[in-house]
Amino acid sequence: MSTHAPATSAVSRPRRVERLIAGQATSDGAGVRLTRVLTQDLQRRLDPFLMLDAFGSDNPDDYIAGFPDHPHRGFETVTYMIAGRMLHRDSAGHEGLLENGGVQWMTAGRGVIHAEIPQQAEGVMEGFQLWLNLPARDKMMRPWYRDFSHADLPQFTTEAGVAVTVIAGASHGVTGAVQREHTQPLYLDLHLPAGARFAQDLPADHNAFVYVYRGSVRIGGQTVARQRMALLANDPATDGVVIEAGPEGETRALLIAGQPLNEPIAQYGPFVMNTKEEIYQALADFRDGQLGEEAQT
């Protein structure tokens, strides 16, 4: 699903960088080493996004144990594999294999128990997991998920040679693989040749950030180095963002934006609800074996 030279995106009043964030080295699952880029203290500022983890290593000891059975309730997970192979298995008996360039979009809703298991003993394992909040009205919806291979994801190349994968939302007239009415997420993977420029229109009231995972970029005169997240300032006078690649070779970056829900956030580990009482209920349901229900595909 790749196209060339689609409609241009005119941005006349681009956003600036509010601040740069390095992320925190941590581990999750059964000891998988990763960097937590979007941490819990940024959830209100980057509403509706709850978390972004970046993982990448060619040392199997850093990832081989994977993420054994664990629960989720109240939000969506978007797992994007840059390199490697990861098997998903859930409490409803569904399985899916994520490979290079593939995405799994899972809506945990009222509850699902799943595992993510590496399917390789050596080589590079690299990717991202984004947590996207659900509005209060949808937190107890029936779970859902879908796997997308790289070929399933809409892609295009701009006249400047920027290769864009549209995981969610829309860019330059190309509609992404997933749309969400209430959070309106935009999720782009950008591959920019040295010195190339990419413009993306953004609603002024949407929260947005850029994460650079190869090379470097400049946004509003501010350099954003590799493994840094640029939190984009909210300004009602702006209409988008302009990203310029550095001179050192191909740059790769994620551009993520969404409409804030402006609802209370109550989180306890893998449960994200609106009140403490709903968290207590999630814990009780998990304890009583009532959390993992069949998901729709």
Image: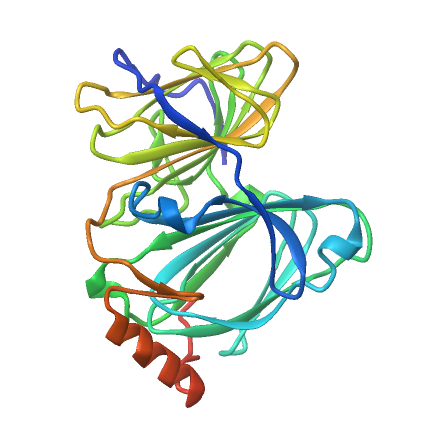
Image point (22%, 57%), residue name: 264
Where in the figure is residue 145, as x and y percent of width and height? 44, 62
Where in the figure is residue 30, as x and y percent of width and height? 66, 66
Q: Nearer the viewer, residue 49 or 38?
A: 38
Residue 112 higher or lower than 24, as above or below: below
Residue 197 higher or lower than 156, as above or below: above
User: Tag count in the figure?
Assistant: 0
Quarter of the image where the C terminus is located:
bottom left
Image point (25%, 76%), residue name: 277
Residue 213 higher or lower than 48, as above or below: above
**Quadrant of residue 68 in the image?**
bottom right
Q: Nearer the viewer, residue 70 or 97?
A: 70
Residue 189 appears left or right of 281: right
Image point (19%, 49%), residue name: 262
Outermost residue, left direction? 236
Outermost residue, bottom direction? 288
Q: Nearer the viewer, residue 200 or 261?
A: 261
Where in the figure is residue 105, as x and y percent of width and height? 45, 55
**Quadrant of residue 64 in the image?**
bottom right
**Quadrant of residue 89 in the image?**
bottom right
Where in the figure is residue 135, as x and y percent of width and height? 23, 58
Image point (46%, 59%), residue name: 146
Residue 82 higher or lower than 92, as above or below: above
